[in-house]
Amino acid sequence: MTESFSADEQVATNETLLLSKLEQLGGRAGNITLQRELQWDLDAYWQVRDRLVDSGRLALGRGKGGSVSLVPPVPDAGGVEPQCDDQQPSPDRLAEKQLYGPVAEVIRTQLASDLRFGKPIVEITANQGRKGTGGTWTRPDIVMASLRVFPHVPGKFFDLVSFEIKPLDGIDITAVFEALAHRRAATQSYIWLHVPAGEDLPNDLPPLLQRIEDEAARYGIGMIVGATPADYSTWDIRLRAVRHDPDPETMNEFIAQQISMVSRDLLAQWFR
């Protein structure tokens, strides 16, 4: 590695070199193979690789000696997406994608305050196409990040709260297990179920909701049943999620890969 550049220029150059070499190798390669292809010493390789992992441009993988793969960039949606005319909430049945915008906005403006999460960062993470997630059911539909301080407890507490959103036609017991999978990276996980008011509902819905609630309670998953996505007064918080502490490396990897650069910059400011 040459020393003819400034420190910042050298960092950017080395990151570009590694990404370009990995692209030449098909987008995925073992650490040792990639290090040898670049002809870097191991310490230099690990430093560049770790920066790219933390910035969300590389994902860690399996294999002898470990591996890395390219990660498509996260769209900088700026958190809650603007709603189109056909996304306006109504008491009628809505498709799942129509729920994301109004639900995310209410999470940010009202639910977060009710649950004492202060000023959170809320993002819709569902709309990322075929982007890798790290496993089945590991990408939530909506994520809320918050840094909390309590008057009688020392320290600051970082929370990453996931939400699995289900329309009326998609309500099923598997929602609980999807939310449970989110806890690999989230401190709390919720399911949000759309049950519109004023329309004929399936006769088997009440017992199904009770079964889902019982199962969610077993695993510490939060459960919210909402009639109108944009109206918090119609949201019934049937269960509060139980907080737990996920592996910080897994949480860091999730943030790097699934949350936009704008929000990652805001998170970085919290810890300065």
Image: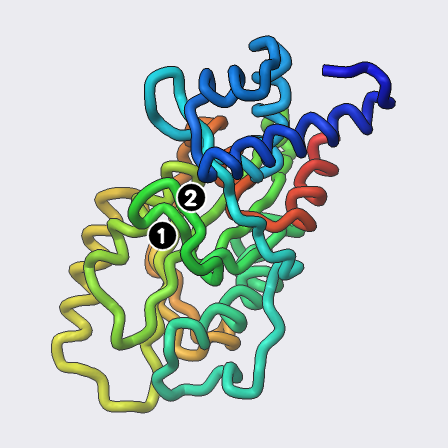
* Mark 2, other Cα within 10 Å: few <14 / some 14–19 / many ≥20: many
Residue sitting at x 72%, y 15%: 1
Left or right placement of residue 74 versus residue 212 in this view: right
Marking on residue 232: none
Q: Which residue is mark 2?
A: 188
Q: Is residue 245 visible?
A: no
- Tag 1, which secondary structure? strand
- Residue visible at 74% across and 26% down? 11
For the residues labelled 2 and 1, the Cα–Cα distance comes to 8 Å
- Please tell me which residue lies in front, 115 or 181: 181
Where is residue 12 shown, x and y percent of the image?
74, 31
The amino acid sitting under disc 1 is Gly
Q: Which residue corresponds to mark 1? A: 222
Q: Where is 87 relative to 198, above or below? A: above
User: Residue at image x 54%, y 51%?
Assistant: 144
Q: Are marks 2 and 1 in contact (CB under 8 Å)?
A: yes
Label whose residue precedes the other's in the sequence (2 or 1): 2
Q: Is residue 158 above or below residue 163?
A: above
What's the residue type where badge 2 is placed?
Answer: Gln
Q: How is the image coloured?
A: rainbow
Q: Nearer the viewer, residue 120 or 240?
A: 120
For label 1, count other residues whose C-alpha is less than 10 Å away and answer few (under 14), some (14-19) or many (20+).
Answer: many
